[in-house]
């Protein structure tokens, strides 16, 4: 991660934190996700993959 810009790292951290907290909510608190939330999670993962690929 030495070659990444600070802005890229902050975006990675923010999206990763949201995904981690969502996973904790699903596993520990038995939260359920609706259709739009699942689409949002998929898009967040795709954005992380694209950011790591082209950053």
Image: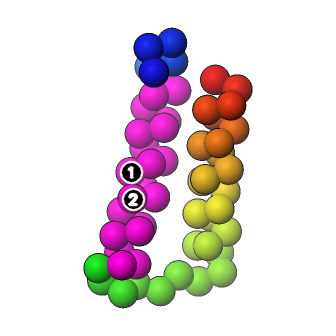
Q: Residue furthest left?
A: 28
Magenta span has 39?
A: no
Q: In the image, 53: left or right of 25? A: right
Q: Quadrant of residue 18?
A: bottom left
Picture quadrant of residue 6: top left
Residue 31: quadrant of the picture: bottom left
The label shown at residue 20 is: 2
Q: Identify the residue at the far top of this view.
A: 3
Q: Which residue is mark 1?
A: 17
| 24 displayed left or right of 1 | left
* Local SS, label 2: helix
Viewer-proximal residue among 3 and 41? 3
Left or right: 25 as drawn, with respect to 53: left
Q: Any magenta on residue 9? A: yes
Q: Residue at image x 39%, y 59%? A: 20
Give the Cα distance between marks 1 and 2: 5 Å
State whether residue 13 appears in this view.
Answer: yes
Where 18 sits versus 11, above or below?
A: below
Span highlighted in magenta in the image: 8-27
Residue 45 in percent (x, y) is at: 61, 53
Residue name at image x 68 percent, y 50 percent: 46
Does the residue at mark 1 contact the one at mark 2 (Cβ under 8 Å)?
yes
């Amino acid at each position: 991660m030495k070659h990444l810009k600070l802005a890229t790292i902050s975006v990675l951290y923010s999206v990763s934190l949201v995904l981690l907290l969502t996973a904790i909510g699903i596993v520990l608190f038995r939260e359920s996700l609706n259709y739009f939330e699942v689409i949002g999670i998929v898009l967040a993962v795709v954005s992380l993959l694209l950011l790591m690929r082209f950053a």
